[in-house]
Amino acid sequence: MYKYDKYDQAMVDARVEEFRDQTRRRIEGHMNDDQFKPLRLKNGLYLQLHAYMLRVAIPYGTLNSEQMRKLGHIARRYDRGYGHFTTRQNIQYNWIKLEEAPDILAELATVEMHAIQTSGESIRNISADQYAGAAADEIMDPRPWAELIRQITTFMPEFSYLPRKFKIAVIAAEEDRAALRWHDFAIRIVKNDAGEIGFECYAGGGMGRTPIIAYKIRDFLPTGQILSYLQAVLRVWNRNARRDNIHKQRMKILVHELGEAEFRRQVDEEFQHFLALGQDVPQAEYDRIAAYFAPPPFETGLSEEIDRADPDFAVWIDRQTVAHKAPGYAIVNISLKPIGGIPGDISADQMELVADLAEKYSFDELRATHGQNLVLPHVRKQDLHAVWKALVEADLADVNLDLVTDIIACPGLDYCSLANARSIPVAQKIAERFADLDRQLDLGEVKIKISGCINACGHHHAGHIGILGVDRKGTENYQLLLGGSGAEDTSQAKITGPGFDEDGVVDAVERALECYRAQRQPGERFLDTYRRVGFDTFKEAIYG
């Protein structure tokens, strides 16, 4: 993983001290909240319903045991003993005292972490495939490119005050584990017919009030030209965006209004201008960064055999581990979705336990996932049983990856000042309704995603089953959506009809799943059956 040099460290340390002074002036009354707001947002600090919330960046989801232990320490010392992992591979703390926020940032800086550009109108944390560098199906590790983009877009003067937030993703496999086409800008590493590696580029995606799936705007971009091309995309948006209307400022609106062809034309025009400057990515700089992502010293000659005598362990192996590119190794998914728990939450003690496991069994490497879970990317198959036993003792061995209880949910009205309805209780009730593991396994892959408002932080538009909480004359009401996907078969979910109360939407989810069971053909997922039999069949089952 990337390591700070003296310039990186100096930059982050200076930013901490700058924010410490800004916080002091706010507390002493030399600044009002309107003046302080853009400053704290640039440092990841939100004012929520009950307290300040701090969002910490985990670039492309990669961190080590020292960093995870620091996150656990912060949870215990400055919060209420837990943190919350998000769909952008960040972690949030929900109970922060303003006067202690600079101290937290200073502690993060000691382990090469920060909260810069995790909020506000800026280029947000660069996300990536959580299996990067380990996946058997990837062309190459995409993280060096994600790190390169992170470095060139942090504090870039022209793009420091954007019309709205801007989200970027980088992957290198056909299977999309990062919701590529729901981003403002995204690249997939590909090979052309000549065997050359380059980028397939997408732009104009996003959720929220106006969900739009990104367009492919370039089939193949030589890797060395990514800086010029990204700047061209950003400049076209920054120059033309609707700054007069907050609901129309995201890049997806511009791409939609200009049209795919005209947007591409303007980007190509700017792209040629940047290419003429000759200031793109030097190979030496890519090589410098890529050296930090060299593969671990994998052992050779390891056995592929796993003792599956324990049936509980065998089920966990089948559900929570994924094929690794190195023989004798496996990728381990750690569920943060216990039945009755809060999706994405993890205690300080659990953070420290996972850090210990990463240090002992996974070359000191951890990943946070788009699905609000964690990953140990490089575990020897002969160590899987020991890892499983430790996870069982820490209540982290739930067997539900991509099943009906592996629910993505935003914090909702329990914490968020923007929310209209609660998300957490709905997620808990659905998980409890489907707690029986045999029932979950029978239903197979079902991705449920819940948002407490139209901003769609729970990605309900991309759920096989999506739930959107809205306010209906002072009452929480939940719309049910079907047919979305954030994977390589990207699609937007469709609202089924009138909303439900909290218990009613849980019943509606069950009716939709029972319709799937009645209609499915062998080997079909919920989404496959929905697409085959159509919307009306499911709507009839839900509403009767």
Image (cartoon, helix red, strand yellow):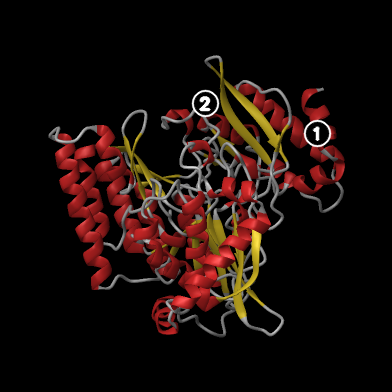
CB-based contact (under 8 Å), mark 1 and mark 2 = no
Front residue of 72 and 157: 157
Q: In this picture, is 288 found above or below 35?
A: below
Residue at the image position 46 percent from the left and 36 percent from the top: 411
Residue 487 position within the rendered picture, expressed as x and y whole percent measured from the top left: 66, 55
Residue 51: quadrant of the picture: top left
Q: Secondary structure at mark 1?
A: helix
Residue in view at x 38 percent, y 54 percent: 57
Question: What element does badge 2 sit on?
Answer: loop
Residue 515, position in %: x, y?
A: 81, 35
Judge whether residue 132 can be spotted in this image. no
Look at the picture and state if 247 lies above or below 397: above
Image x and y of residue 309, in percent: 64, 62
Q: Which residue is mark 2?
A: 421
Q: Which residue is mark 1?
A: 538
Quadrant for the C terminus, please: top right
Please name whichever residue, 235 or 87, is drawn nearer the observer in this view of the structure.
235
Query: Which residue is depicted at the point 54% across and 53% down?
Result: 184
**Amino acid under label 1?**
Phe
Quadrant in the picture for the N terminus: bottom left
